[in-house]
Image (cartoon, helix red, strand yellow):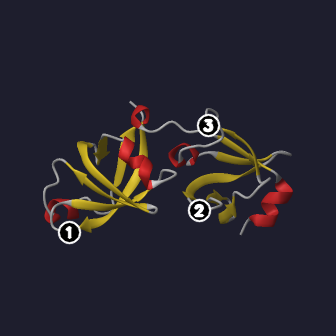
Amino acid sequence: MEYLTVANVLKPQGIRGELKVKVFLDSAEELKQIKTVYIAGEKYPVMNVRAAGEFAYVTLRGIADRNAAELMRGKDMEALREDCPPLPEGRYYIGDLIGCTVEYASGGKVGEVTEVTPARTDIFTLSTPAGEVSFAAAEGVITEVDIAAKRITVDKKRFKEVSV
């Protein structure tokens, strides 16, 4: 079974065990399509999801009060890949991008993706021999994504223009 991280638990919300989560899908609304999630290897049926921007408020069976919800703080919420909504062509789950090697189209390794921050133009953070480098996935920067090979190819000139 293959899992994808779909959210991270930020904190308890209220006294009835509801969780405030940061959603790692294109929208918090997509979390409503997932019926079962896993936190720290434990299976939890999803009872309710309220979307609020990039966040959601989630009620899970088995987390009945604030004390139980507090134990989930900071943990990743995962779902089976087959339970996640399908993506349109050219879109990828963040979990699939983490660990990809980033290379220049002209040759040469840049680094490895350690984080992707969803935004209007997603921000990729790389671990490189020189330290951490971030770049915006602006138009023309990424030329190819090969999830199977865990490789992202970037245009060297555009990459240098947008990286910090």
Give the label on residue 147, or none: 3
Residue 14, numbered circle? 1
Q: Which residue is mark 2?
A: 119
- Identify residue type, mark 3: Ile
Residue type indicated by callout 2: Ala
SS category of the residue bearing label 2 = loop
Q: Are marks 3 and 2 in contact (CB under 8 Å)?
A: no
- Which quadrant does the C terminus fall into? bottom right
Q: Is residue 152 left or right of residue 99?
A: right
Q: Circle 1 — which element?
A: loop
Residue 82 location (% of width, % of height): 42, 31
Mark 2: give few (<14), some (14-19) or many (20+) Cα within 10 Å: few
Which circle's residue, 3 or 1, is located before the other in the chain?
1
Q: Residue at x 27, y 60 (%)?
A: 19
Left or right: 115, with 37 as reference point: right
Task: Find the distance from the CA under tag 1 to the CA under tag 2.
Answer: 28 Å
Q: Residue at x 30, y 44 (%)?
A: 38
Q: CA distance from mark 3 to mark 2?
A: 21 Å
> In the rendered structure, which disc, 1 or 2, sits on the residue that comes first in sequence?
1
Q: Give coordinates of residue 140: x percent, y percent.
A: 80, 53
Number of dots carrying numbers: 3
Q: Is residue 102 above or below residue 86?
A: below
Check the image and report above or below for 88 versus 111: above
Considering depth in this image, is 86 or 147 the residue closer to the camera?
86
Quarter of the image with the N terminus in it: top left
